[in-house]
Image (cartoon, rainbow, N blue to C red):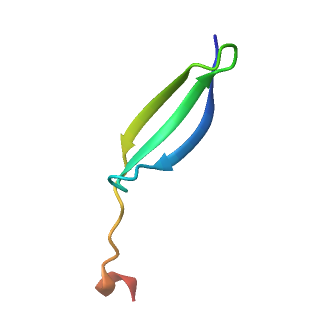
Amino acid sequence: MRMAFRSTSSTQAEPNFQDTVYACEQCGTEIVRTTYRAIDAVDPARAA
């Protein structure tokens, strides 16, 4: 059995969480992996 990457997207409820979908190439069974990703805030003093 081989799981293949299908898609990735931000969740609707919280943009810091990202859903990554993997699926079995033989039967199509999907696994959704939800991960936290920090959204870096830009410090205006350091951006200049």
In the rendered image of this protein, does residue 5 appear above or below residue 10? above
Residue 6 locus on image (x, y percent): 62, 35
Where does the image place residue 16, in percent across and percent down from the top left?
A: 35, 54
17 lies above or below 4: below
What residue is rendered at 35% in x and 65% in y? 40
Q: Nearer the viewer, residue 44 or 31?
A: 31
Relative to the observer, which residue lies in front, 12 or 10? 12
Query: Residue at the front extreme?
Result: 12
Tally of numbered discs: 0
Q: What residue is drawn where x is 69% and y is 14%?
A: 26
In the picture provided, is 9 more to the left or to the right than 27? Answer: left
Q: Quadrant of residue 7?
A: top right
Quarter that holds the N terminus: top right
Residue occupying the far right of the picture: 26
Q: Picture coordinates of residue 45 (x, y %)?
A: 30, 86
- In the image, residue 34 lies at what x, y percent? 39, 37
Is 48 or 35 nearer to us in this picture? Answer: 35
Q: Quadrant of residue 24?
A: top right
Direction top: furthest residue: 1
Is 38 drawn above or below residue 25 in the view shown? Answer: below
Residue ID at (64%, 20%): 28
- Quarter holding the C terminus? bottom left
Q: Which quarter of the picture shows residue 2?
A: top right
